[in-house]
Image: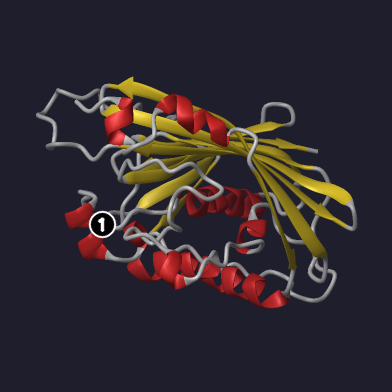
């Protein structure tokens, strides 16, 4: 097994810590076109008039990186070593997020986001070397804080081989009882549309030969933020009057376009609701919690 320095190229774990505290700021305007596009992608009509409130997590369609094509790596992400540290491990995944919605964003708002790398940690697990990067995002409009997000990114090695049956622990089972459950067909078109809306060039989501041959996945990978968005979209369908104050989610295992999955919600416990995504066989894929006003 490669050690931390070897797997990360010429930079070691201690050097990666130098990225802690690095910041970047970007600006945008909440316009109607991406809102219409995401509403169409989710098959959920949403007001797109000026002043209409943006549903929770839909801010991920704005404040997007505009890296020139010539500055992208083979995986479709920007070359590493700019804002994010130069970690050479081949697999990069959105592991989870924790968000606080302080005030709503609305169509027509001018917005800014300050992003800060708050932690970099290298660990060795059963699947090999892992590097965790934590980024804090603060989204503001009219000089007032609107959203605070802590974003977890994980980099990992590509598995050397498919584990033998029983060699790896099975993912936990999803909760047995759900107050509501929606079936999702993760078609290549759905994944492509979400990639386009979020300007995400990561090839594991739309380039099947790359995903399977280069990164060793069994199919196209469903975006972690898309799963999170589908979870809150399901809640919005069931309880359109509910207002989300806090939301957190954690990826348990990836989902692929080769099989349908379900987004589910539990029964409220006070102001808290458990949400989760589960595979067609009932295994947990994403765990989430929402706190309502």
Horizontal side of residue 51 vs 120, given as left or right:
right
Location of residue 128 (image quadrant): top left
Which residue is located at x 34 percent, y 37 percent? 10
Residue 145 as seen in the image, left or right of residue 176 = right
39 up-or-down from 162: above or below: below
Above or below — where is 62 with respect to 23?
Answer: below
**Residue name at image x 60 percent, y 49 percent:** 232
Residue lying farthest front?
A: 10
The 10 Å Cα crowd at callout 1, few under 14, some 14 to 19, many 20 or more, is: many
In the rendering, at what x and y percent does residue 49 appear? Answer: 79, 76
- 141 or 248, nearer to the observer: 141
Q: Nearer the viewer, residue 116 or 144?
A: 116
Between 258 and 271, the residue placed more toward the observer is 258
Asked if residue 71 can be seen in this view, the reply is yes
Q: Percent position (x, y) of residue 204?
A: 33, 57
- Which residue matches tag 1? 211
Can residue 186 be spotted in the picture? no
């Amino acid at each position: 097994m490669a050690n931390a320095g070897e797997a990360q190229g010429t930079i070691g774990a201690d050097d990666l810590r130098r990225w802690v505290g690095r910041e970047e700021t970007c600006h945008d305007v909440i316009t109607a076109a991406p809102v219409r596009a995401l509403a169409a992608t989710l098959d959920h009509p949403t007001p797109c008039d000026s002043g209409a409130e943006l549903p929770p997590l839909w801010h991920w369609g704005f404040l997007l990186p505009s890296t020139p094509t010539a500055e992208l790596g083979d995986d479709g992400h920007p070359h590493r070593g700019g804002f994010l540290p130069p970690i050479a491990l081949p697999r990069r995944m959105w592991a989870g997020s924790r968000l606080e919605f302080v005030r709503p964003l609305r169509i027509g708002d001018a917005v800014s986001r300050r992003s800060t790398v708050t932690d970099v940690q290298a660990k060795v697990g059963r699947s090999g070397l892992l590097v965790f990067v934590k980024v804090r995002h603060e989204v503001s409009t009219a000089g007032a804080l609107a959203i605070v997000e802590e974003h977890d990114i994980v980099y990992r090695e590509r598995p050397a081989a498919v584990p033998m049956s029983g060699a790896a622990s099975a993912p936990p089972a999803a909760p047995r009882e759900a107050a509501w459950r929606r079936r999702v067909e993760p078609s290549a078109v759905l994944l492509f549309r979400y990639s386009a809306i979020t300007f995400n060039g990561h090839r594991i989501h739309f380039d099947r030969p790359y995903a399977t041959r280069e990164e060793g996945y069994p199919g196209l990978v469903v975006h972690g933020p898309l799963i999170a968005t589908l979870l809150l979209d399901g809640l919005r369908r069931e309880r359109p009057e509910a207002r989300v104050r806090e939301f957190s989610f954690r990826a348990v295992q990836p989902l692929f376009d080769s099989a349908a999955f379900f987004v589910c919600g539990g029964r409220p416990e006070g102001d808290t609701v458990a949400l989760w995504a589960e595979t067609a066989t009932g295994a947990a894929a994403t765990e989430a919690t929402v706190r309502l006003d």
